[in-house]
Image (cartoon, rainbow, N blue to C red):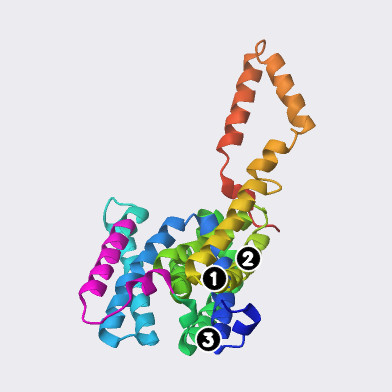
Amino acid sequence: MTWLPDALQYEFFQRALLGCLLVGFTNGFLSAYIILRRLALLADALSHSLLPGLAAGAIFFGLAPAGLFVGALVAGVLVCLGGVLISRSSRLKDEAAIGALYTMAFALGILLLRYSSVRVDLEHFLFGNILGLSDFDLWMNYAISLLIVGLLVVLHRPLLLTLFEPSVAQSQGVPVNALQLLLMAMIVLAMISSLQAVGVVLSLGLLILPGATLYLLSDDFGVIAWGGGILGAAGSCAGLFLSHWLDVSSGPVIVMVLGACFIASYLFSPKYGIVTRLLRPPHLHEQSYERWGTKNQRDHPRIAASVAADAKNKADAPASENARPSA
């Protein structure tokens, strides 16, 4: 077991730390859009669809990082476009079409890796190895992070309008379909950048958990996006140090650190935490309204119907309304 300051003297650990900062912040920042757009299932499908591209890249180009990057990118784009094509030419929805394609792609990737002439450690692709980050991987992460964060900042308002009011955005001339495809492309790029850190299987956790955690803590979109980026970077670095101290694989530890933050926010969020709501006394207005409704609803059917409708609307209110962008 090596003391952590000593580990920072090694160049491979410095590259791993920089990679965690870049990958964690980029995935955490993008996570806000995925959570609010409810694209978690799509992101899961895309993460598994990268495996056949990695396998094809290893077969045709060897284990060169550039070949693996191109293979994963082509596989992710093909699954995206294939899902859109199938959904628009059949009765299937986007989720069903992409779900069918990604399971086929994942199975094909496993078969290619198992029976190809190239000997590759399957666990390396599935769970990642951030300590094996090369200079090319690091520069690729720089480029992907700059591209994704830059696009999200520049296209902030049209993307939010597309997320919450697509019909209004279309009436104002916003290219809704193009922005949705661009968002899918950014998801693919973010997952490719995180493959070396957490692998194909765990890349979804790095892309979902930061935004989900901040979504339980704040209603402000800016806080969710930037806070998700900071949490993703901090959690990735903490997971790297913890995995080095425990002498275990870094990918699962990074996801577990972010998962612990999510569970803590789920339980103890000041506004939405389960434990917090159990311990917090009801508001005086809520108590008086409940007593008033109980007292009068027997004698006044209209009041009873109003109270019941109000309770139903409160229970069925979509969670996404709480995270509308602030002015």
Q: Disc 3 designates what residue?
A: 12
Across and down, in percent, residue 239 comes to 57, 69
For marks 1 and 3, the one nearer the N-term is: 3
Q: What's the amino acid at mark 2? A: Leu
Helix, strand or loop at label 1? It is helix
Residue 196 appearing in the image: yes
Q: Are the residues at dot 3 and dot 2 in contact (C-beta closer than 8 Å)?
A: no
What residue appears at the point 33 percent right and 72 percent down from the top-left corner? 122
Across and down, in percent, residue 4 comes to 63, 78
Distance CA(mark 3)–CA(mark 2): 23 Å
Q: Find the residue positioned furthest to the right.
A: 284
Labelled disc at residue 231: 2
Frontmost of labels 1 and 2 is 1
Frontmost of labels 1 and 3 is 1
Chain part drawn in magenta: 99-128
What residue appears at the point 52 percent right and 63 percent down from the top-left corner? 255
Q: Disc 1 designates what residue?
A: 243
